Amino acid sequence: MSVWNSHTSVGNIIGSLVASEVLEYGWGWSFMNVGAADIETSEKLESEEADLLHASNVKDVESSDAIGFLEAWTLPGVVPFAFCLFFSKLVAYTFLSWLPFYIGHTAVAGVHLSHKTAGILSTIFDIRGVLGRILAGFVSAKIKARVATSIGFLFLSMPALVLYWAYGSISMLANVSLIFVSGMLVNGPYSLSMTAVAADLGTQRTVRGNSRTLATVTAILDDTGSVGAALGPLSAGYISTRGWNSVFFMLIISVLFAAKFLIRLARNEIKEKLSERK
């Protein structure tokens, strides 16, 4: 599932590269090119979506009652994973939105890079994000502990962000390497939470066999994360007026909060694994 979920990073990479290529003509062309591609893709998918909506099993789906929105929040694991996604996506999308600007306005080895080069360089964050998602899925499948894997990636991402903050401008090699590591560690946890963990929540007695309830739970996770993805770049815009140190401090604190929401679940998961071995 982590491999499947990596398509979002692939889209981010392609979008950044397309935008970087036409930057010299103005930012407006970046949106025009990507928007045109989006319209073309939507038209091709329209017929497939129509076939899915008229599938024979739709009646079975409609016959089941969905759990209420507020009731869905009371299901075990929904609140901690929802807020973990909030802070994880806040960090990931702040990087996605502001990294080209940060690289373009921060001297790397004493040299300010062009906007085009900064945009291309920022895609390394998402390239490594693809690998981070796959690695997180592989590790969680091996140790059969998804929560522990997520919290491990989160704790490791904090020193990675500190190192990029402190040493990313020393040289191009240091900048690329630290973006590489940060992208892997930041993207892994929220990808794992959105895919495998959502599937685990779907096995609960209240949710199992009820596609509408599962859709409600998945929507809560996804939308809570999307709120964080929107607020992160917006907050960074205001906080950056006080200096980039403040932005990195916000990101590190956000990662800490994301990990905090999973500590109790990770502790219970580890206890279960240890008891199974006895």
Image (cartoon, helix red, strand yellow):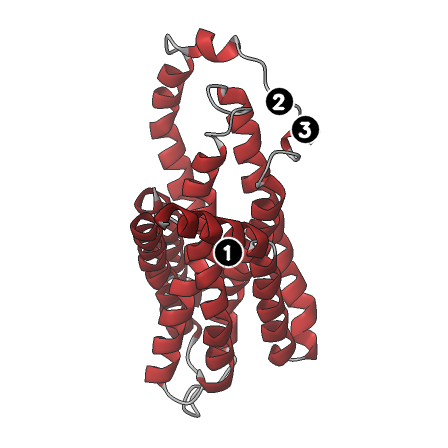
Q: Where is residue 237 in the image (x, y as percent from the top left)?
A: 65, 66
Graded by Cα atoms within 10 Å as few (under 14), some (14 to 19) or many (20 or more), the crowding at tag 2 reads: some
Kindly identify the residue that appears in the image at 32 percent across and 55 percent down.
139
**Is 230 positioned to the left or the right of 121 in the image?**
right
Nearer the N terminus, badge 3 or badge 1? 1
Q: Position of residue 10 (x, y in %)?
A: 34, 52
Secondary structure, mark 3, is helix
Amino acid on which disc 1 is placed: Gly
Q: Where is residue 197 in the image (x, y as percent from the top left)?
A: 46, 42
Secondary structure, mark 1, is helix
Graded by Cα atoms within 10 Å as few (under 14), some (14 to 19) or many (20 or more), the crowding at tag 1 reads: few
Graded by Cα atoms within 10 Å as few (under 14), some (14 to 19) or many (20 or more), the crowding at tag 3 reads: few
Q: Say whether marks 3 and 2 touch (CB < 8 Å).
A: yes
Secondary structure, mark 2, is loop
Amino acid on which disc 2 is placed: Ile
Kindly identify the residue that appears in the image at 34 percent across and 77 percent down.
177
Instruction: From the image, tell me which residue sits under label 3.
Output: 71
Whether residue 33 is visible to the viewer of this picture, yes or no, is no
Kindly identify the residue that appears in the image at 45 percent across and 74 percent down.
160
The one of 43 and 278 positioned closer to us in this rendering: 278
Relative height, residue 54 to residue 90 (above, below): above
Instruction: From the image, tell me which residue sits under label 2.
Output: 67
Instruction: From the image, tell me which residue sits under label 1.
Output: 28
- Corner quadrant of residue 179: bottom left
